[in-house]
């Protein structure tokens, strides 16, 4: 299979160049790369691609800034192959990535999503073990020794207990995600919502534990800033309550219960409390407490009521 690799870009040009080089270093050459620049104000980006001299790599620049979600949607819309990866502009594909997901696709042609094994790196490219990622790995990620297809309520419940997926590493059947698209109004959990929508339609996900992707986690990410000011968790709370209602209507009561409890999301919010207090952000403290403790027995904050 030829893999469409799309990079929606607005960020650090040096990290983008490293990402592109990681794609060029793939052992399986059956790929094409398209970078969609969302108007980043640095002319050297276009100049670098103009001098790259690799016909497998295309560079497009949006006439106006679309924003992250709209640029993701554009990447999906212009993909030409069956399978697409929306690669982060600061993440790295290890040399076997295309080979691993191609083998998974050959073994499971019906799958809507393929998740390969991932390691986490910091802004310097050093492998790190963060609390968030170690929790994903040890508590929520399935303990599988080989490639496995999953779906239905069991997978939905697993992801709602703790989202162990890494969106930039996912390989999607583009026709299936075009039918669904990103739900409007989501900026942090749009990836989990997309996968959940696929599962509720009866689609499957294939997990291959072979580590072939490096996900970069650093404090400058959009989700980190949203977490620090609390808006991330406002969005997450709305998402989980809506998901619980939809899953209950589908008859997936165990998954609905996991959505209502959303324990890992609550714990994640509480880890940001010390930073919010140090920055003297009482609004963020209230938001974090409401998400972390709201609705629990004996909670110190009022239970959230859906509007």
Image (cartoon, rainbow, N blue to C red):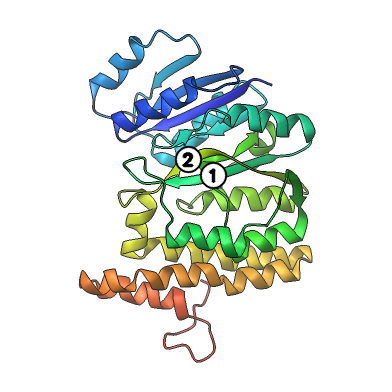
Image quarter of residue 3:
top right
Inter-mark Cα distance, 2 to 1: 6 Å
On the rendered structure, is 119 left or right of 208? left
Q: Nearer the viewer, residue 294 or 130?
A: 130
Q: Height in image: 93 above or below 141?
A: above
Say above or below: 71 vs 141.
Answer: above
Position of 119 relative to 56 (above/below):
below
Quadrant housing residue 40:
top left
Q: Which residue is at 55% across, 59% downward?
A: 136
How many residues crowd around disc 2 within 10 Å: few (fewer than 14), some, or many (20 or more)?
many
Judging by the rendered image, the residue that carries numbered circle 2 is: 214
Residue 109 appears in view: no
Question: Which residue is depicted at the point 50% across and 60% down?
Answer: 134
> Residue 286 location in percent, x, y?
34, 77
The reply to whether callout 2 and callout 1 are in contact (CB within 8 Å) is yes
Check residue 304 in the rendering and tell me which mark sits there, or answer none. Answer: none
Question: Is residue 188 rendered to the left or right of residue 81?
Answer: left
Question: What residue is drawn where x is 61% and y is 17%?
Answer: 30
Q: Which residue is mark 1?
A: 118
Pointer 1 local density, CA inside 10 Å: few below 14, some 14–19, many at least 20:
some
Evaluate whether residue 151 shows in this view: yes
**Of label 2 and label 1, which has the lower sequence position?**
1
């Amino acid at each position: 299979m030829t893999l469409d690799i799309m990079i929606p870009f607005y960020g650090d040009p040096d990290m983008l160049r490293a990402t592109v080089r990681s794609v060029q270093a793939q052992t399986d050459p059956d790929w094409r790369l398209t970078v969609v620049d969302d108007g980043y104000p640095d002319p050297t980006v276009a100049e670098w691609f103009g001098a790259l001299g690799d016909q497998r790599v295309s560079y497009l620049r949006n006439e106006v800034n679309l924003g992250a979600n709209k640029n993701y949607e554009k990447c999906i819309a212009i993909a030409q192959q069956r399978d697409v990866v929306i690669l982060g502009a600061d993440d790295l594909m290890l040399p076997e990535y295309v080979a691993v997901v191609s083998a998974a696709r050959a073994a499971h042609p019906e799958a809507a999503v393929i998740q390969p094994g991932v390691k986490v790196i910091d802004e310097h490219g050093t492998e790190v073990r963060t609390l968030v990622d170690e929790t994903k790995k040890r508590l929520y990620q399935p303990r599988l020794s080989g490639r496995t297809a999953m779906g239905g309520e069991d997978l939905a419940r697993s992801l709602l207990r703790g989202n162990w997926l890494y969106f930039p590493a996912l390989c999607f059947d583009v026709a299936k995600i075009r039918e669904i698209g990103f739900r409007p109004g989501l900026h942090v959990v749009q990836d989990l919502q997309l996968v959940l929508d696929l599962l509720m339609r009866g689609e499957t996900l294939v997990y291959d534990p072979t580590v072939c992707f490096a996900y970069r986690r650093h404090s400058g990410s959009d989700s980190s800033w949203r977490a620090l000011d609390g808006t991330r968790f406002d969005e997450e709370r709305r998402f989980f309550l809506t998901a619980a209602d939809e899953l209950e209507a589908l008859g997936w009561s165990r998954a609905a219960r996991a959505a209502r409890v959303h324990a890992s999301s609550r714990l994640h919010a509480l880890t940001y409390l010390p930073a919010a207090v140090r920055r003297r952000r009482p609004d963020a403290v209230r938001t974090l407490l409401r998400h972390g403790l709201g609705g629990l027995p004996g909670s110190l904050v009022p239970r959230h009521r859906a509007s």
